[in-house]
């Protein structure tokens, strides 16, 4: 069904397509998939797509969209054409990600201790100590194994054959790993023959690796097998499905704040047999909500006294409170320096060029070039509160300029990247759509990167926004073995 | 197991069982409403249907006119009625969703797809023609859920909390149906016989899907004392009070053994089961049928309360 001519003219801007070269030949790792796509009929693909949608709906893999009261449980669109990454490409990414997460953890340890990087003048003190994501309460505390961020989702975009850039480091509570796992199960179910023809590196060990990672950072005083629990805000949270899924796959309890109590110098969950000890809490709620006695007093989601217990080394919180500073968008611009400072190596993965509106010269450049840039709020996420220059109206740009002038420290800007495209099924046929990639990294007794990740795809033709809250979908990501 | 998990499993099973019982009552109500009463009208008795479902006071508090359309809407679709089939299915599903990890995939799929499909129904499009079909479907889905549970759920504490939810709800339902119609089951009515009473006895049996079972078991025409005995005391009848208690007591016993707790719920449950095993219909009638049923409803509710206290649900 795939018409190569029609496929390529589907690209409205000139950008790197991961399947086809400009001369319509397939890149090596896509050869098998390309040939297979040419043999498929539109009706056949449509039928498989309907089958996939039915599977997801039945499993209840939905996410909640804030502010959409009626359809508060929506299905994330799943595109059934896999994205393929070669073994060599993956080795490169893996090395780069590992270097980056080690450096970021070293950075967190440093800023919560002697702040050598600030003393060395490599990063402004204000950016660390005046940052709302910086938690002074963490000063001088040593988390088990010195790890602050154990579970990281590194957002990577591609612009050319060798052009991989890190767009964001998500060090707080990155989500999406359940989609990586369920997308894979669905693909193996729908297309066993295509899957078998590819030698795809497995991802299904993730839950086991996650459990090992969590147990490896149990408090030092913990004897016996450390008890792990996943803390969720509850069924109305947008990622509730994932919280339940991970707890289930790891074989540990899924708890809410009301199930937990701090007593006798330990954390307990209320069970039908009375109380049971918790050593490691994988919490999927934000710092501000974990403990009403230490942070937001109105929080109903957390556990009173939890943070004091953590500081006393009686329970491990994953990720550590205060890690948000390392994925702050203003700090992001300094990550290449951070990597060099702590590892003594050149960064393997590049950053996207970033203009900091807090700095007068850079702000001037941003205000003059709004039409070409993407402007983001420093603390924003989910694709909200951003301006995409080339797609914006004059009025929107004027509004943003005003906001930037009023609160420059709150904004950064980046060039609009020509994100790479992959083939996606677009109702009437197969066309190129922009994608990004979020591999998942685990840091405990060692660093573990699962070969794969979540590919997010902007299903709307020409769109660059891949966030699920903005109409993006997901794909299975196939990392090939040699 | 978390206390909250136990609570959710218990209520998930109760709501699913309640949805099934409501569907059966609504079907009987519908059937009766199209049978002529021989006096130019129909036998229609929505008041009894709502009373059997335990929701007559709530309906009357609204001051709405009671007819087939309002009763059926109230029983099936009303979002403001806590025990409408719609809300039961949603509550069952949300309780299941909150403890997704304690369910098997088969159970979750049964819960989830039932809710999704029911929520997609437009009440305005369900005319009398589709009503029976829809209610059949609800009963089938409840059966599918229960089948998934029996066929796939590990026999640990979670299973027993589900069993308790199912049988405490079912016992409550059967006792309520009998309580609403207790007068037509009194022996004096046997002598009176009559077409009208035959119909009432038939309706009671239908409300628990037991017409065929009754004929097969007794090989006799409908007699009030046999109907009463069948629904209260026969261990062979899967919706009788005795049958329910024969499942409630062992599950309470198993939980007590597994957890080393649960003394008060176990004491209540085993006493009630032992009494049902040792009593007979004559003793009940001497004591008073109405009194017996009221006493049973109270004690069944007390087991539910003791369970929540014993296992830290509350």
Image (spheres, rainbow, N blue to C red):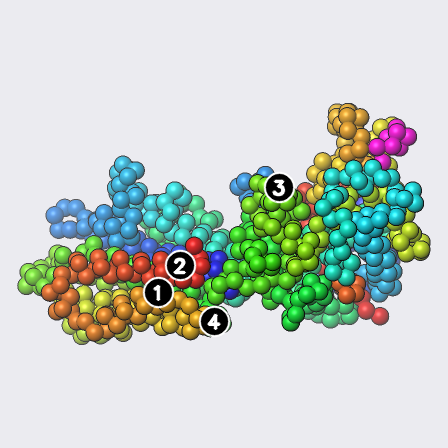
Task: Check disc 4 and report the residue beneath it.
Answer: B156
Q: Give the left or right position of residue B272, taking residue A421 as reference.
A: left
Position in image of residue B99 (x %, y %)? 52, 59
| First to last magenta residue range | A356-364
From the viewer's perspective, is residue A389 above or below residue A477? above
Q: How many residues crowd mark 3 within 10 Å: few (<14), some (14–19), many (20+)?
A: some
- Which callout, 4 or 1, points to the residue nearer the camera? 1
Q: Position of residue A291 (x, y in %)?
A: 61, 47
Q: CA distance from mark 1 to mark 2?
A: 9 Å
**Residue visible at 45% across and 70% down?**
B259
Return the x and y of residue A220 as percentages of the image width and height. Answer: 71, 65
Residue at mark 3 to residue at mark 4: CA–CA distance:
39 Å
User: Considering the numbered disc 3 on the image, is that residue within a helix, a strand or a loop?
Assistant: loop
Q: Marks 1 and 2: same chain?
A: yes
Residue B58 appears in the rendering: yes
Q: Is residue A50 visible?
A: no
Q: Secondary structure at mark 2?
A: helix
Q: Does B122 lie within the magenta span?
A: no
Do residues under tags 3 and 4 come within 8 Å of each other at their CB atoms?
no
Determine whether, in the image, residue A73 is placed left or right of residue B196.
right
In the picture of the structure, the residue carrying the numbered disc 3 is A296
């Amino acid at each position: 069904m795939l018409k190569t001519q029609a496929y390529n003219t589907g690209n409205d801007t000139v950008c790197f397509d991961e399947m086809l070269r400009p001369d319509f030949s397939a890149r090596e790792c896509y050869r098998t998939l390309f040939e297979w796509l040419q043999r498929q009929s539109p009706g056949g693909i449509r039928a498989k797509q309907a089958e996939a949608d039915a599977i997801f709906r039945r499993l209840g893999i939905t996410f909640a969209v804030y502010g959409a009261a009626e359809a508060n449980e929506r299905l994330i669109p799943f595109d059934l054409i896999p994205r393929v990454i070669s073994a060599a490409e993956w080795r490169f990414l893996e090395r780069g990600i590992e270097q980056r997460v080690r450096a970021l953890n070293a950075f967190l340890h440093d800023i919560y201790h002697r702040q050598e990087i600030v003393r060395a003048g490599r990063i402004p003190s204000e950016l660390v100590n005046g940052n709302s994501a910086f938690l002074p309460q963490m000063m001088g505390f040593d988390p088990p194994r010195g790890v602050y961020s154990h579970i990281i989702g590194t957002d990577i975009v591609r612009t050319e054959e060798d052009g991989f850039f890190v767009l964001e480091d998500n060090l707080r509570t990155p989500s999406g790993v359940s989609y990586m796992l369920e997308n894979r199960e669905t693909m193996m179910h729908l297309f066993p023959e295509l899957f078998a023809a590819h030698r795809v590196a497995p991802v299904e060990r993730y839950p086991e690796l996650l459990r090992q990672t969590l147990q490896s950072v149990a408090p030092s005083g913990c004897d016996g097998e450390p008890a792990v629990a996943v803390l969720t805000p509850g069924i109305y949270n947008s990622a509730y499905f994932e919280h339940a899924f991970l707890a289930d796959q790891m074989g540990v309890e899924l708890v809410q704040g009301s199930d937990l109590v701090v007593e006798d110098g330990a954390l307990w969950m209320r069970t039908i047999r009375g109380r049971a000890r918790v050593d490691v809490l994988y919490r999927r709620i934000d710092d501000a909500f974990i403990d009403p006695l230490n942070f937001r007093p109105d929080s109903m989601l957390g556990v009173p006294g939890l943070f004091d217990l953590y500081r006393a080394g009686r329970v491990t919180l994953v990720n550590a409170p205060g890690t948000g500073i390392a994925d702050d968008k203003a700090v992001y611009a300094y990550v290449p320096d951070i990597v060099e400072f702590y590892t003594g190596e050149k960064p393997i993965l590049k950053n996207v060029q970033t203009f900091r509106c807090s700095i007068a010269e850079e702000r001037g450049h941003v205000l003059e070039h709004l039409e070409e840039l993407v402007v983001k709020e420093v603390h924003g996420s989910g694709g909200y509160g951003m301006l995409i220059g080339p797609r914006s109206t004059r009025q929107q740009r004027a509004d943003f300029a005003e906001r930037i002038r009023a609160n420059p420290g709150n904004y950064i800007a980046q060039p609009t990247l020509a994100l790479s495209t992959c083939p996606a099924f677009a109702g009437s046929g197969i066309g190129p759509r922009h994608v990004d990639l979020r591999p998942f990294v685990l840091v405990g007794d060692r660093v573990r990167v699962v070969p794969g990740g979540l590919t997010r795809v902007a299903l709307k033709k020409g769109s660059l926004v891949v966030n699920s809250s903005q109409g993006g979908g997901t794909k299975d990501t196939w990392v090939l073995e040699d | 197991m978390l206390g909250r998990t136990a609570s959710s499993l218990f209520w998930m099973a109760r709501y699913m069982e309640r949805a099934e019982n409501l569907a059966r009552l609504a079907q009987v109500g519908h059937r009766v409403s199209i049978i002529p009463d021989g006096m130019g009208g129909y036998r229609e008795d929505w008041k009894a249907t709502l009373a059997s479902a335990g929701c007559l006071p709530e309906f009357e508090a609204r001051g709405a006119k009671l007819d087939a359309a309002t009763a059926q809407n109230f029983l099936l679709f009303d979002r403001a009625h806590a025990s409408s089939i719609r809300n039961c299915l949603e509550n069952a599903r949300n309780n299941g969703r909150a403890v997704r990890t304690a369910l098997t995939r088969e159970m979750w799929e049964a819960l989830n797809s039932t809710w999704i499909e029911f929520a997609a129904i437009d009440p305005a499009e369900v005319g009398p023609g589709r009503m029976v079909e829809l209610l059949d479907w609800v009963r089938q889905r409840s059966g599918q859920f229960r089948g998934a549970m029996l066929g796939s759920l590990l026999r640990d504490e979670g299973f027993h909390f589900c069993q308790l939810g199912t049988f405490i709800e079912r016992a409550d339902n059967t006792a309520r149906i009998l309580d609403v119609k207790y007068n037509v089951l009194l022996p004096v009515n046997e002598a009176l016989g009559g077409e009208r009473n035959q119909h009432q006895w038939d309706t009671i049996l239908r409300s628990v899907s037991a017409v065929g079972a009754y004929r097969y078991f007794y090989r006799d025409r409908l007699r009030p004392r046999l109907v009463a005995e069948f629904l209260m005391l026969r261990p062979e009848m899967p919706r009788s009070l005795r049958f329910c208690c024969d499942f409630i007591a062992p599950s309470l016993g198993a939980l007590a053994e597994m957890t080393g707790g649960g003394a008060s719920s176990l004491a209540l449950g085993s006493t009630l089961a032992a009494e049902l095993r040792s009593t007979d219909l004559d003793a009940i009638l001497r004591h008073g049928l109405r009194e017996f049923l009221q006493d049973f409803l109270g004690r069944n509710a007390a087991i539910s309360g003791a369970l929540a206290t014993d296992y830290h649900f509350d």
